[in-house]
Image (spheres, grey):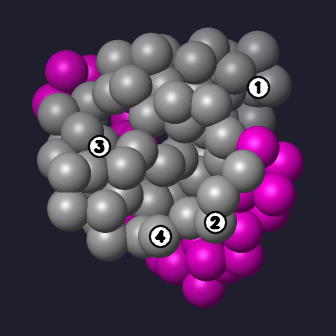
């Protein structure tokens, strides 16, 4: 799914007040964590994931893996927080047309 800049801006606004739903622990990105992120995307469509690492390269690899494994769209990364979106069949969040 490709989103326009307008749609991404809209999702950033919606995500502003959200709290992180998934927090990566000391074990990093495991299959269980990916399954939890996948489940959270099914339920909420738009989620925040907290990635506790100071290394930019490591954080980038984790973000890329999450997006690839879940089929979500990266809305933004701010600090240690990833905002991801994947629309479900119910379409709970109505994003504006392109």
In this view, 91 is above or below 38: below
What range of the chain is rendered magenta?
Answer: 4-32
Q: Which residue is mark 4?
A: 94
In this view, 51 is above or below 81: above
Disc on the earlier residue, 4 or 3? 3
Spatial CA distance of label 3 from label 1 is: 21 Å
Left or right for 96, reference 73: right
Q: Which residue is mark 1?
A: 55
Q: Which residue is mark 3?
A: 37
| Image coordinates for residue 92, horizontal then vertical, percent | 32, 71
Disc on the earlier residue, 3 or 2? 3
Q: Name the residue located 36 percent from the left edge and 58 percent from the top edge.
A: 45
Instruction: Mark 4 and mark 2 in contact? Answer it, CB < 8 Å.
Output: yes
Secondary structure of residue under mark 3: helix
Disc on the earlier residue, 1 or 2? 1
Spatial CA distance of label 4 from label 2 is: 7 Å
Left or right for 14, reference 8: left
Spatial CA distance of label 1 from label 4 is: 35 Å
Q: Nearer the viewer, residue 30 or 87?
A: 87
Spatial CA distance of label 3 from label 2 is: 24 Å
Asked if the magenta segment contains residue 74, the reply would be: no
Q: Which mark is residue 96?
A: 2
| Image coordinates for residue 65, horizontal then vertical, percent | 48, 16
């Amino acid at each position: 799914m490709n989103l326009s800049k307008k749609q991404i801006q809209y999702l950033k606004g919606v995500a502003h007040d959200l709290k992180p739903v998934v927090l990566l622990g000391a074990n990093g990105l495991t299959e269980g964590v990916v399954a939890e992120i996948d489940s959270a995307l099914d339920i909420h469509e738009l989620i925040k994931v907290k990635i506790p690492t100071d290394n930019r390269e490591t954080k980038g690899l984790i973000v890329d893996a999450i997006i690839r494994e879940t089929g979500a769209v990266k809305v933004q990364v701010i600090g240690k927080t990833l905002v991801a979106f994947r629309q479900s069949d119910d379409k709970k969040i109505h994003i504006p047309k392109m």
